Image (cartoon, rainbow, N blue to C red):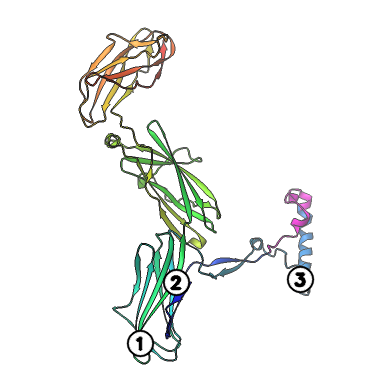
């Protein structure tokens, strides 16, 4: 849409959007006459495969006779590629068309001299005006166009990476000397609206120490989108791997070393087609302890690139994706090593580690086996003193220790109820998850 201030001007702007042409399709689609009479599996029969093609070929040659003025062969398939309906021609855009976020707006602008005399010293400016800002695309103030003859024109091309939604205005202005020497100012406005090409819906779920991010991308355009890249850029302290159903191993997405050299694009069909991506996120060490203390829930953002008609590119970046706030876990108790061979009624040592995730000194600690139920029989018990005393652990520090246990029953047993208590703060932490062992006879 173009608007111009009132007044008589020798010059006028003409704007055309530059974009890739589309394939010209000629409906109705053509067909092979054999498809009307026989099925596609008819040539599985050796007798039909030997006799039917010559018969159909002679009939088709007769129907394609140039002396036939009934044009009865206009729907027949002359070449296998005719089935697609492509004429081999490319169709130039017939209108300004839809402009989407993430694309590059490219415009061919022509300033025409419609008068019968020459205009001189033309200063041309082209700007994109949005609700938030004005962006200068062209300015010839330092080198004005010397002249445009009567009936002539001056052409130029401008480009702009579309980064905002909503109403946009292409403002074209010209300051020039008319035939009588009068300095005139011509403003002209071309308005268009930028729409969102796709929507991204995310779902975050945390299972123990692992976070899973599901991203659903939906195509809102009238053309197919070929996704070159949908890559998750994790926030600091996080590592990310993309999970694919057709791969045995996840692909590391946190460094360039794990990226594939070539990946075939993923097709998301026009008018509501969707595709889902799944990422596995984990806190990376050694800064993960500090991350837990800060309690931040920023996971990262998605980088999305795609191509449309004849390879026209588009690119979007999502806002920071938030997960569930990370709980501040003061201490963490984990088993480092368990003997591979455990005999009945013989003691064995379990190697454990206690880590302080806070910025202050904690402890001393007591370690014991808690009784989950008064009626529950424990088949793995502490051998010796029932409580082990551990010294204080410095901020963000850790300590290793061994726990002597003994099994009183054969078969698969569970080490359960290993609990740590802070004797200074009178606080008991959650017990260590159960660990299964196999007890053999001596």
Looking at the rendered structure, the secondary structure element under dot 3 is loop
Q: Nearer the viewer, residue 346 or 156?
A: 156
Name which residue lies at 35% across and 67% down: 135
* Secondary structure state at the residue bearing disc 2: strand
Instruction: Reply above or below: 403 against 97.
Output: above
* Numbered circle sitting on residue 71: 3
Sequence-wise, the earlier of marks 3 and 2 is 3
| Quadrant the C terminus occupies | top left
Q: Is residue 313 positioned above or below 145 on the image? A: above
Counting residues from the start of the chain, the first of labels 3 and 1 encountered is: 3
The x, y position of residue 175, in whole percent, is 35, 81
Residue at screen point 51% across, 47% down:
275
Q: Which mark is residue 190?
A: 2
Which range is magenta?
A: 28-48
Calculate the distance from the C-alpha at mark 2 to the C-alpha at mark 1. 24 Å
Count residues near mark 2 (Cα–Cα under 10 Å), then give few for <14, some for 14-19, many for 20+: some
Residue highlighted by disc 1: 120
Residue 411 x, y percent position in the rendering: 44, 12
Location of residue 153 by image quarter:
bottom left
Circle 3/circle 1 CB separation < 8 Å: no
Kindly state the secondary structure of the residue where label 1 is placed: strand
Residue 31 counted in the magenta span: yes
Number of marks drawn: 3
Foreground label between 3 and 1: 1
Give residue 232's position: percent from left, percent from top: 40, 46
């Amino acid at each position: 849409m173009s608007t111009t201030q009132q007044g008589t001007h020798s010059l006028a702007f003409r704007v055309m959007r530059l974009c890739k042409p589309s394939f010209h399709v000629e409906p109705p689609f053509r067909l092979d006459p054999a498809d009307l009479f026989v099925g596609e599996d008819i040539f599985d029969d050796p007798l039909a495969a030997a006799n039917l093609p010559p018969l159909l070929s002679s009939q088709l040659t007769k129907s394609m006779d140039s002396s036939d003025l009934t044009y009865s062969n206009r729907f027949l398939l002359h070449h296998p590629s005719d089935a697609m309906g492509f004429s081999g021609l490319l169709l130039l855009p017939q209108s300004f068309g839809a402009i989407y976020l993430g694309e590059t707006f490219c415009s061919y602008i022509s300033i025409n001299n419609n008068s019968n005399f020459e205009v001189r010293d033309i200063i041309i400016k082209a700007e994109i005006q949005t609700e938030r800002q004005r962006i200068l695309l062209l300015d010839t103030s330092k080198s004005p166009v010397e002249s445009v003859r009567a009936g002539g024109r001056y052409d130029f091309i401008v480009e702009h990476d579309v980064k905002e939604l909503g109403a946009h205005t292409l403002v074209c202005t010209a300051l020039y000397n008319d035939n009588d020497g009068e300095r005139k100012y011509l403003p002209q406005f071309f308005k268009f609206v930028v729409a969102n090409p796709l929507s991204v819906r995310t779902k975050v779920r945390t299972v123990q120490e692992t976070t899973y991010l599901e991203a659903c991308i939906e195509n809102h355009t009238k053309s197919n989108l070929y996704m070159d890249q949908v890559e998750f850029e994790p926030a600091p302290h996080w590592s990310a791997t993309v999970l694919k159903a057709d791969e045995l191993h996840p692909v590391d997405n946190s460094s360039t070393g794990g990226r594939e050299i070539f990946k075939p694009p993923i097709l998301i069909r026009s008018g509501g087609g969707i595709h889902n991506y799944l990422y596995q996120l984990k806190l990376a060490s050694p800064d993960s302890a500090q991350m837990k203390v800060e309690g931040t829930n920023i996971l990262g953002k998605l980088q999305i690139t795609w191509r449309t008609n004849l390879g026209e590119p588009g690119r979007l970046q999502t806002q920071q994706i938030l997960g569930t706030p990370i709980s501040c876990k003061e201490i963490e108790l984990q088993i480092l090593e368990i003997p591979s061979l455990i005999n009945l009624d013989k003691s064995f040592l379990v190697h454990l580690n206690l880590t302080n995730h806070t910025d202050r000194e904690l402890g001393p600690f007591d370690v014991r086996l808690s009784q989950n139920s008064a009626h529950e029989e424990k088949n793995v018990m502490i051998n010796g003193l029932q409580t082990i005393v551990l010294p204080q652990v410095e901020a963000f520090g850790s300590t290793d220790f061994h726990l002597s246990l003994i099994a009183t029953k054969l078969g698969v047993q569970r080490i359960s109820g290993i609990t740590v208590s802070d004797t200074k703060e009178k606080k008991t932490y959650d017990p260590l998850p159960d660990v299964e062992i196999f007890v053999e006879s001596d």
